[in-house]
Image (spheres, rainbow, N blue to C red):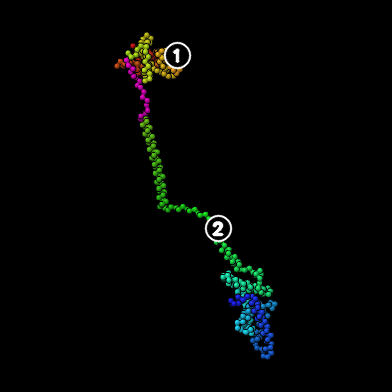
Amino acid sequence: MAENKKMSTAEILAAARAAKAAKAEAVEAAPSADATDKPAPQPAAAKPAAAKPAGGAGGRPSVAEIMALARAKKEAEQGGSPAAAAEKPAPKPAAPKAPAAEKAPAAEKAPVAKPAAKAAAAKSVTRDTASILAAARTGAKPGPVSKADAPPRPAVAAESAAAVVKAPPAKLAAAPALPPKPVKPVAKKGAEAEQDRRGFLEMALGSFMATGFTALSMTGGLFGLGLARFMFPNVLAEPPSRFKVGFREGFPAGKVETKYVAQYGVWVVNSDIGGQQQIYALKTVCTHLGCTPNWLEAEQKFKCPCHGSGFYKDGVNFEGPAPRPLERYAIRIADDGQLEIDKGRTYHEELGQWADPESYITV
Ligand code: FES
């Protein structure tokens, strides 16, 4: 069978023609034999096969008949006589058709699975057989068909399909490389995460407590400073309201002593007041707006530098805006004979207080 498949269509046709010619010669030689001998029953059996026209349509041989003739020709060439081949009963036309029809699809499928060389040879045979079958059905003369007339090759479709199947890897290889995915942070596991949370809470609580204690300490310190300030206030040291200025002999008549102005704010004056020699203490505060007047020895008056008020030696105002006379402090002779001035008590002339014996000392 394999040798039969390898035979080309031209060889098959040549073998068929040779077999047909041999049969025709055998038919022509048969009457002569019948004339001498009685006809044997066997030639009758072979006669229909030889006389029967090959093929069922228009006297043309069918594919099965062509194949059978090819086999007979080959067997005759290998050792058998043409007569034996001719005597061999021809197979029925219907019987060989079924195997041929069954073999055609198998031959078509073979190129897909077998190697390239075998597939190419099988495809040529299959294609030729199919073309022969198609021509036999349509009544045309069987023979080789051109590639243009041949049906589409399944192997080409299979090859294209294989190419399509193989294409994706090339496309994938040529595809641009995707950027690397970012590495996901690894989540810490139970004990470690719990330890971290505790550490964070302890740190936060410690910071909160430290801040609270710091604020409390600062508040306590400020409170202590305020308390100390309250207990020890910054008080100006004022001179005592009573002070001694010396003995009366140290204040001659008509004299204004100015040496106690800076320290005590007092003029000690020995002057004649209404025919009586008195020593008294004048307050060094202008009755206008509180400035400190100056004693002008040459002019025998007190002159205020602020607004020009003027006062006599006895303290009575006589010029300027001052509304009233200067005030006097209380004065007395202390136990030790010195003059003692008390700034806690003042005497006003407009109130008639200068007549009070505590507002002066007689000399
Ligand atoms: Fe002495 Fe005004 S304050 S005159």
297 left or right of 141?
Answer: left
Q: Is residue 354 visible?
A: yes
Q: Is mark 2 within 8 Å of ligand 1?
A: no
Quarter of the N terminus within the rendering:
bottom right
169 left or right of 258?
Answer: right
Q: Is residue 356 visible?
A: no
* Quarter of image, res 81: bottom right
- As drawn, 167 above or below 361: below
Please say whether residue 216 is one of the residues in the magenta stretch: no
Given residues 266 and 94, the one toward you in this image is: 266
Residue where numbered disc 2 is placed: 175
Residue situated furthest right in the rendering: 58
Task: Classify mark 1: helix, strand or loop.
Answer: strand
Per the rendered image, the range of residues in magenta is 231-248
Task: Return the x and y of residue 300 as percentages of the image width and height.
Answer: 41, 12
Residue where numbered disc 1 is placed: 319
Identify which amino acid the numbered label 1 is placed on.
Answer: Glu
Task: Classify mark 2: helix, strand or loop.
Answer: loop
86 left or right of 274?
Answer: right
Q: For mark 1, does the 10 Å Cα neighbourhood hold few (<14), some (14 to 19), or many (20 or more) residues?
A: some
Task: Return the x and y of residue 100 as percentages of the image width and height.
Answer: 62, 75
Quarter of the C terminus within the rendering:
top left
What whole-number distance in Å separates the C-alpha atoms at marks 2 and 1? Answer: 116 Å
Identify which amino acid the numbered label 2 is placed on.
Answer: Ala
Residue at image x 40%, y 41%?
A: 211
Nearer to us: label 2 or label 1? 2
